[in-house]
Amino acid sequence: MSYGYHGRILRVNLTERRSTVEEPGDLFYRRYVGGRGFIAYTLLQELAPGIDPLGPANKLIFAAGPVTGQPIGGSGRHSVGAKSPLTGGYGDGEAGGFWGAELKRAGFDAIIVEGQADSPVYLWVHDGQAEIADARHLWGQPTAAVEAAIRSERGDRQIKVAQAGPAAERLVRFACLINDVNRAAGRTGLGAVMGSKRLKAIAVRGRQAPPLANPTGLKSVARWLAQNYKTEAEWAVKGGTPGGLMWLHEHSLLPTRNFRQGQFEGAEAISGQTMHQTILVGRANCYACPVRCKQVVEVAEEPYRVDRVYGGPEYETIAAFGSDCGISDLKAIAKANEVCNAHGLDTISAGATIAFAMDCFENGLLTTADTDGLELRFGQAEAMLAVLDKIVRREGIGDLLAEGAARAARQIGRGAEELAMHVKGQEIPMHEPRGKQGLGLGYMVSPTGADHMHNIHDTEYTTEARIADVKALGILEPLAANDLGPRKVRLFVYETAWRHFTNCALICNFLPYNYAQVRDIVNAVTGWETTVWELMKVGERALNLARLFNVREGFTRSDERLPRRFFEPFRDGPLAGQAIDPAALAAAQDTYYRMMGWDPNTAAPTLAKLQELDIAWAAE
């Protein structure tokens, strides 16, 4: 077996309450690597077309990568995937923290969960063993209580727990999976899949780290990081993701009032700087990482008391519940973050769906008769938290909004669909595509629906200094942020192939490694003597498998479109008058499909492309 892996995948059938262990072999690991590669392969191979995402035929896959759990910064990540109940297509999400590293130490590279338990259970995985345990006493409990209970039952405070919160039990379509109480595999509604299986949690513990091919080589890169992270990742060290909010506001890139605007008059009140001066009580890291980029906040007084055990809001959460909802009360935003972590909700989709509802209310499409008496207007923090609680419980207006903005809009009708900011049913993250137009293309063509992580952020490639790293991919000249020409598409193709690869290897994108250093990490772990080119092809392979899954589920080019709002220019601010040109976007879309080797009419990979990627089997 290759270094860096155990060569063991755990398969758990909840219907039959039994587990088996599979050993795929070296070729499987090198071809698909881990994370997204494992998930896309398994879903395409094993799911019948058209299954109900919330039925027993769906499969929930937890996958590590070769880097997961290794003694180097950025290795604390794992991936989770299934057919998405939010989009109806390919779904996955990544999370940091400590759970993934502990899964590797427990003796497995991945867990495939299938079937459906007849009553709530949790899975106890430890040192190569697996046990299905009763979880009826845990059902309905918030995440911190569940983790504490499992650790107490098993007599080990080092157990790591990934779980479905109460919102997932109620099948909220954007429920997420929470691990370590305050880290989330947030997107595509995977918590609802876990809840539908009546699987409350997976607890892991182990002492079986897989061997390394070249420990000295890995230590060399780790030493470089230890010596340079304070300068090379200064933004993460100083403020983490919230630290960039004011920059986005100043450049009209901060989603405000359901993407009506790009600047928020209350930006300073919810900025990372204000949080650090007020409610921040600490910073946290992930497994083996020296960069403490995670926020820990606490609010002692009512009405927004917040427990530090649930961490603190990152940028996406602050913008989703803050500027996108027109809210400038940082304590209320921190409370919304706590509610989401305690009950298992994706903060992006939750905040964006509430912003959509506020837009509907202000346009007369919803009234107090629909909202249980709530004046659901932009800027109303109490109303935001009240409707969030209703979503968690699927009560009143919350039952409608728990379906996500796209489904809710179809039910409301009367033009509400124009106000739902989503792609393929997944709510758009807190990054404005009118000022980052390649990002807008990325929202459209993402296999998971709108996503900001396996995407590009155009402002990162506008100067010679900023493109220093991507010159290794042959991107030799800076590109304007609003460029949608062939050179921008080429950059998008190369960079996103790499990002899909990092979601296979499971290495954090916030660490300042360049492509060669990531290659060196993979080689030190596995002994493969691989190249950056091969690793990019791994990412491209995973992307093509995910796209084929969507094609099989009936997705076409017509599903890859942006909301009309992004074709309307801002009225003021630095981007006044700027919008996305639909014709330029369509041309970029054509160019992208052709560069990828996909049919520009169907948006499906061609047989020749699948043959080139050594996955011709997927054409069937």
Image: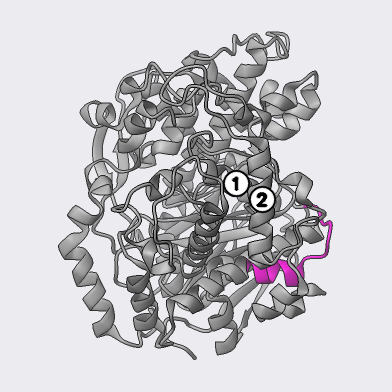
- Residue 586 percent location from the top left of the image: 69, 44
- Please identify the quarter of the rendering in which residue 57 is found: bottom right
Badge number at residue 343: none
Say whether marks 2 and 1 touch (CB < 8 Å): yes
Question: Sequence order check: which comes first, mark 2 or mark 1?
Answer: 1
Vertical position of residue 377 compared to residue 579: above or below:
above
Q: Please tell me whether the stretch drawn in magenta is mainly helix, strand or loop.
A: helix
Image side of residue 269 versus residue 122, left or right = left
- Residue 139 percent location from the top left of the image: 60, 45
Badge number at residue 589: 2
Q: Amino acid at mark 1?
A: Leu
10 Å crowding of disc 2: few (<14), some (14-19), many (20+): many
- Residue 341 percent location from the top left of the image: 47, 40
* Residue 607 visible at all: yes
Q: Amino acid at mark 2?
A: Gln
Q: Which residues are magenta?
A: 38-52
Which residue is labeled 1 in the image?
A: 441
Residue at (70% x, 61% y) in the render: 547
Residue at (23% x, 36% y) in the render: 281
Could you say whether the residue bearing mark 2 is in a helix, strand or loop? helix
Image side of residue 126 versus residue 308, left or right = right
